[in-house]
Image (spheres, rainbow, N blue to C red):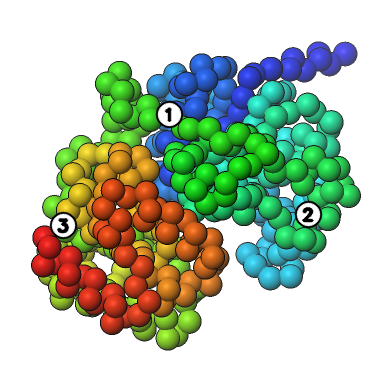
Amino acid sequence: MASKEIQVFRDSCYFCTSIFQMFSILSLAISRKEKADLYLDPQFKDVEGYAERIRATGIFEDVCIIDSKKIYDRFISRESGLINHLQIARTYLHVKSVGNIIVPKDRSYTNIFVSSRAFIPRLYILSCYKKKEDVNVFYFDDGVGSYYGNSALKPSKLDGTLRKVLFGKKAVDFDQDRYLLCPTLYEKINGKTPYQVLPVESFWEKEEHKALLDQVFPCGGDHVLNETAVILEELSDEYFSENCLKLLNETYEKTRETFGTDGLLIKSHPRSKGEKREGFRYYTNYAIPFEILCMKNEMKDKVLIACGSTAVATPKMITDQEPYVILLYKFILHEGMEQDTLDNFFRALKNSYRDYEKVMIPASIEEYNECIVRIKKEL
């Protein structure tokens, strides 16, 4: 007779799909002092290295890399479009078996921490609902979307209906407590909410945790930012129209003319495929997230430029430093970003600055040029 499988009960599990999320996860795990596991969805570079370094800290009982390829190979053949949505819907019919691929079936948790509606963590949560497990779901910071109501969490109308039919009302209830790097920014945008918005503790500011930060995010001497201007690239040019792509290229050229080749650095998106513009200097150490660079550099005289990347808010949110920030989304429309969401977030960021004039949102390439010329003179 086969022996009965022993169930392992732990307080919490955390799902990580990007390096940015790691700061909130580590902070929560340290402050909560629970028995917890970490699950890494291998969407970012050096995931094996991060898993190994985090295991060595002893913060988590277990650190696992999810075999998400197995799930995609079995269920998902299209990355977008109607067929993709139908394939995602089909996985809902198999959430129990999919859930066992994501998390070992001998594990049970009281709390699940997740940042957004990301596909893999979502399937595990739905599998828990399907099995009638009594779990608490909490959300943590995932950038712009996390600061605009439940926009980072809510499904489409069709997807929401399907979830409700298959898994019950709990599958479409997103009024759970959340942990954010800057709760005051959330409150300015949303006002009073039916759930608590709690702060992520700045563990990186405490002397006893500085060695931990260096252990998880080793950077040696590559953390120094000598350049004045940093362009934070978006994930892909495919989201820009031909005209917007032309404007984007023009901003690159104008920025290089103003600050010089040696005064401008481009930081690729962590999930970029390595495309580079000829004649520009790129930051090459992908293992170092931008947050670490902000912690280890004086940022007040730096210029951060992006279409709508949350990373430009990082210095203010994490270290209360106020670099110059120029956002391009008003005249370079990114189809993968919601304009109203961006505008609400970045105007709230601007208002949170002690010197709010350092955050600029030009409406044209001409206004952009005026911004960089003005900054150059001030510096």
In the depicted structure, whether residue 72 falls above or below residue 238: above
Give the mark, 1 or 3, whose residue is nearer the N terminus. 1
Give the mark, 3 or 2, whose residue is nearer the N terminus. 2
Q: Amino acid at mark 1?
A: Glu
Quadrant where the N terminus sits is top right
What residue sits right under mark 3 in the picture?
Answer: 227
Which quadrant would residue 11 be assigned to in this image? top right
Residue at mark 2 to residue at mark 1: CA–CA distance: 33 Å
Kindly give the residue lying farthest to the bottom in the view shown.
243
Q: Secondary structure at mark 1?
A: loop
Residue 20: image location, x then y, percent: 43, 44
Q: Are marks 2 and 1 in contact (CB under 8 Å)?
A: no
As drawn, is 5 to the left or to the right of 81? right
State the residue at coordinates (69%, 17%): 9
Q: Amino acid at mark 3?
A: Glu
As drawn, is 156 to the left or to the right of 208? right
What residue sits right under mark 2 in the picture?
Answer: 160
Give the mark, 2 or 1, whose residue is nearer the N terminus. 2
Q: Residues within 10 Å of mark 1 (few under 14, many from 20)?
A: some
Q: Secondary structure at mark 2?
A: helix
State the residue at coordinates (26%, 44%): 321
Residue at mark 1 to residue at mark 3: CA–CA distance: 30 Å
State the residue at coordinates (81%, 15%): 4
Residue at mark 3 to residue at mark 2: CA–CA distance: 46 Å
Q: Which mark is residue 94?
A: none
As drawn, is 356 to the left or to the right of 178? left
